[in-house]
Amino acid sequence: MQKTQGVNTPGLQARPILRSHIRLLVLKVSLLLCFLAIALRLVQIQVIDAPAYQEIARKQYEAKVILPATRGAISDCNGRILVSNAMFVSFGADPKIAGSDAVGIAERFSTVFGKPKNAYLAKFDGSGRRFVWLERRVRPEFSKRIQAEEFEGLIQLNEPRRIYHYEQAAGQSVGFADIDNNGLSGVELAFDQRLRGTSGYVVMQRDGLGRRRPSVDYPRVDPVNGHNVMLTIDLEYQSIAEEELRKGIERSQAESGVVVMLDPATGEVLAMANSPGINPNDIAGAEESRMRNRAITDMFEPGSVFKVVTAAAALENHVVRPDQKIYAEHGKYVVQLSGGRTRPITDIHPFGYLTLQEGVEQSSNIVMAKVSDLVGAESFYRTARNFGFGTATGIELPGEAPGELKRPNLWSRLTLNTMAYGYEVAATPLQIAAAYAAVANGGVLMKPYIVKQIVDDHNEVVYENRPQVVRRVISKGTAQTLTEFFIGAVERGTGQTAKLPGVAIAGKTGTSRKHNEGRYEVGKYTASFVGFYPAHAPKVVCLVMLDNPREGGYTGGFASAPIFKGIVEKTVATSKRFIQKSAVVTAEHQLFAVPDLISLTTETATALLSSSGLTAETIGNGRIVVRQSPNAGTKLAAGGSVKLIMDEERRSAQKGHTVVPDVRRLTIRRALNLLTISQLDVAVEGSGVVVVQRPESGEKVRVGTRVTIRCEPPFRFAAASMGK
């Protein structure tokens, strides 16, 4: 029987083929899926996420560099630049690009600037930042020592730096800006948006050698520079005020001081001085208290300078006449309170009867307290409010305090009396100066302002300030009467230390105890003097305030008035603005009063006449003026001539007769002037005001006849007159 051999069946042959096809199919599907995955990923990268990757790529070879705007300049009213900019060099770095060069950069900067290397390395801290500052606004010569092109990721930029040309001059008023061009105080802060401007930018690209070049594919946006600000401050006035204030503080050993000078006709701030001051070029380490502009931020009880309100209310409401006599209680007045209690009001000097004018001149608290009772609470409060007390002036400076003026319904039994001589009320130095400016300009309160105009980078005016009337406070007649009161305070009252030969000054002293944490400090005072000049045609109002003077007298008359006098003397003699403005006002608006020139040198008298728009004609070869024609107070038009008779001319006076003038009730100085002009010799007995003269007034005598005048202190004369 034959055996059958194995046969290859179709099923058996098909299995390997099928498996091969399956593997091929799986491979194809796998490849297809891989292709689809890659395609989808490419779509995601190139289409869906393309902007994000483009931004990442752009950052690797592009950088947007800010082009800072130049901050606007600040100038005084005459165009003298107070604040400007200088181009300095700044260094920054891109930590990611710098990489390993960070160590070399840190070493180079440490060597050049003398700072620890780790201080610079700490800025490359790997926090993901793409830009850090290494040094800001350093002198341009440092760029040669750094050589930024030697390091990857190191960037050098030119940046403007603020330069305060006159250092401490008006430091608190002008203020300062930080390193990033942000105003932090004063005018720099108040007008930050206008001064700052708008920064631009340029896009830089890195070429194959790693150098940065401007990109031609992106537009360059140029910066828009800030506007320039012109202040009302006059640098001459400011410099004089600061120098005299500094000397006065040293002389009196005061803790600090403030001077405010205003143009009473417009409200322009001519000077605003603080001492101790600040240098905006070197703010680091400066005490915070020095940065305050105390002329507007600090409130104090004004003391007797507030008597302007009391006197104005009495005159305006016709409750007291200027010559009405009031009993001053010989220096001690006891006010009766409820429950049998009493409260004393005292004067430094004992007076008998004083007129309202004499009460202001001698700064009698008792007279003012009694006058306030006649005025009444409502009228007194209304007058104080009209003068601007209790509300901010609105000057364009940050941080102004409004002061404090309580409403009558909150007053105690003594509030009216104590307010009458400047207590239980708080005011800023600027408010006091503005109130006296209202008297100086005929009774109108003007809004103080410190910015005159603003111009853009093309010198086009974009903002201009104009004088703004707040309200009429008192009538012209009342203002004129108050002016005479204040002239008397300087001529024969508490402000005699402010007297300056040849310049008529109207002013008022003020002294108040310092109030701290609800109680008055023993032996600590605020001393003030505020006045305006020339008294009958005021060009300047000036307030001097000292905090706690400790040497040479603590009152306004002893501590502050001499500073005022020094300011007046220098501004009248040296300020071109004062001379020019006087001539303009005289020519346009009024005749000018001839100043008192007796006893002045030729140079000073000529300068004083020139400042008033008048001319001088000298007669004789001496240096001291012994007579003048016309007399002081005579009104002349601009360009009018005043004859100055010098001392040698007196010895050659021609023979003849003259009439003896009436000099009773005049101060010694005024009496001497009047008698000298009448070509008479003078013998003086005593001091104060003239009470007796021999020969009598009206007598016709020979030229050169001796006239004897007997003088007594003002309060004794007033008491003697009352007895009669």
Image: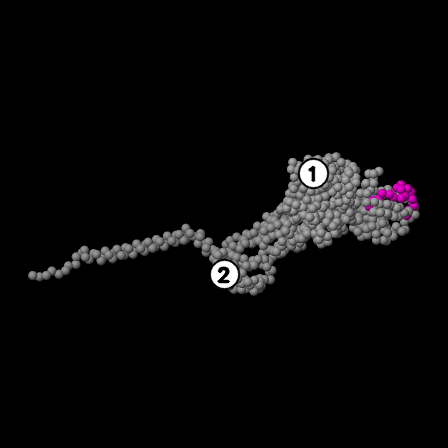
User: Can residue 506 be seen?
Assistant: no
Q: Where does the C terminus fall, quadrant-wise?
A: top right
- Residue 325 as seen in the image, left or right of residue 524: right
Residue 712 shown in magenta? no
Location of mark 2 (residue)? 98
In the rendering, at what x and y percent does residue 637 appear? 79, 43
Q: Is residue 694 magenta?
A: yes
N-terminal of the two: label 1 or label 2?
2
Amino acid type of the residue tagged 1 in the rendering: Arg
What amino acid type should be assigned to the residue bearing mark 2? Ala
| Part of the protein shown in magenta | 688-704
**Front one among 158 and 222:** 158
- At a point 34% along the width and 55% down the height, the residue shown is 34
Query: Residue 7 in the image: x percent, y percent?
Result: 15, 59
Q: Toward the viewer: 433 or 5?
A: 433
**What secondary structure is found at the residue carrying circle 1?**
loop
Picture coordinates of residue 426 (x, y %)?
67, 43
Q: Quadrant of the N terminus?
A: bottom left
Per the model, the C-alpha gap separating discs 1 and 2 is: 83 Å
Query: Label for residue 416?
Result: none
Q: Residue under label 1, please give it.
A: 341
Front position in the image: 629 or 522: 522
